[in-house]
Amino acid sequence: MSEPIEETLTSSSSHCPQLLTVDEIGALLKVSNRTIWRMRSSGQLPEPVRVGGGVRWRESDIENWIQAGCPIQKNVQNKNKG
């Protein structure tokens, strides 16, 4: 007999990175969704991943970014120097 779905999701979730929505990041940083989109546009957030038509951020990328002091990402710094 196969494992229940809940156990399978729980046991496999440690292998899959957690993806955060704009709402979840906004709640984490205590800012509005609009501010999150501005931060993304200006390169202040780590690069998101596309899932279907949506945008998500890896939880580990956001945690590392916060621990590093929320630095501006290199790809935008290079664009602005040119």
Image (tube, grey):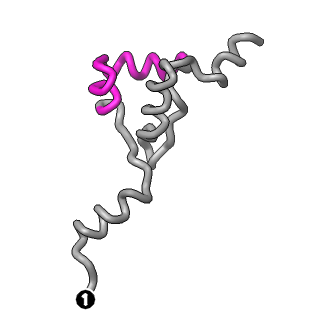
Where, by quadrant of the figure, is residue 73 drawn? top right
| Whether residue 55 is visible | no
| Whether residue 51 is visible | yes
Residue lying furthest bottom in this view?
A: 1
Residue at 49%, 36% in the rendered image = 61
Residue at 46%, 26% in the rendered image = 67
| Left or right position of 64 against 33 | right
Q: Can you say whether 8 is above or below 58 in the image?
A: below
Q: Which of 29/47 is in front? A: 29
**Residue 53 percent location from the top left of the image:** 44, 44
Q: Can you say whether 79 is above or below 48 in the image?
A: above
**Residue 78 percent location from the top left of the image:** 71, 18
Q: What is the magenta segment's predominant secondary structure?
A: helix
Q: Which residue is mark 1?
A: 1
Residue 39 counted in the magenta span: yes
**Residue 52 percent location from the top left of the image:** 45, 49
Where, by quadrant of the figure, is residue 63 drawn? top left
**Residue 6 percent location from the top left of the image:** 22, 66
Residue at 27%, 83% in the rendered image = 2
Q: Which of 72/63 is in front? A: 63
Q: Can you say whether 37 is above or below 59 in the image?
A: above
Residue lying furthest front in this view?
A: 67
| Left or right position of 2 against 53 | left
- Span of residues in magenta: 24-42
| Left or right position of 16 against 3 | right
In the picture, the quarter occupied by the N terminus is: bottom left
Q: Can you say whether 62 is above or below 11 in the image?
A: above
**Classed neighbour count for the residue bearing mark 1: other residues with Cα under 10 Å, few (<14), some (14–19), many (≥20):** few
Classify mark 1: helix, strand or loop: loop
At label 1, the amino acid type is Met
